[in-house]
Image (cartoon, rainbow, N blue to C red):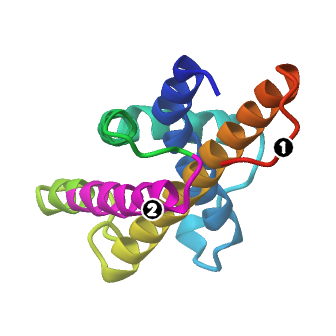
Amino acid sequence: MKDLIRVLLEIFGPPAIGATTLLFYFNLSSDPHMDIEINLGSVIAFLFMGWSIAGIPSLFYMLLMEREITRGAHPNTWQHIFSSCLLGVLAGVALASFFSITHAYGGPNEWLGTPEFWLIVTADGLWTGFVMGLLIKGLTYWGERRSRLATGQTGIGP
């Protein structure tokens, strides 16, 4: 995988995956306050909110993952996925903290700051980190495999 593609994926991928996951969770939730119908408008709204809210944690994710890669870690490893999951959990905790603080100062929704909210946002961060790690691992693997085949190397290697 090209470095630019990986960096763009690390910046724009987590908010899109996290927002889409939350949209499906809210759609399937039995709580009447969270019943959101899935249509093009709600998908666009959630993606916009995801990028505007989780954009800064996503930049930190990209910087830390790229730092790990420049220090010698290979993106085609399970260690990379573990690091991605850990950063996803930290981003989830940071976002839950942010929303809990805004709720404490008169935020619009009483659900913000509840233990259920913390669990959902943190689990969403873990899921997002896992999906991002798998996506980067898979794209790196297939990119390396394609370049090996293009140069005539047919053996199985790292």
> How far is mark 2 from mark 1, CA to CA?
31 Å
Packing grade of label 2 (10 A; few <14, some 14-19, many >=20) is many
**What amino acid is at disc 1?**
Gly
* Magenta region: 76-97
Residue 155 — which label?
A: 1
Is 91 one of the magenta-colored residues?
A: yes
Residue 89 horizontal side relative to residue 1, left or right: left
Q: Is residue 81 above or below residue 8?
A: below
Q: Say which residue appears at 22% left-offset and 63% top-offset.
A: 100
Comparing 5 with 53, the one in front is: 5
Packing grade of label 1 (10 A; few <14, some 14-19, many >=20) is few
Which residue corresponds to mark 2? 85
Q: Say which residue appears at 32% left-offset and 81% top-offset.
A: 115
Q: Which corner quadrant holds the N terminus? A: top right
Labels in figure, total: 2
Q: Is residue 50 above or below residue 98?
A: above
Image quadrant in which you'd find residue 94: bottom left
Residue 151 horizontal side relative to residue 43, left or right: right
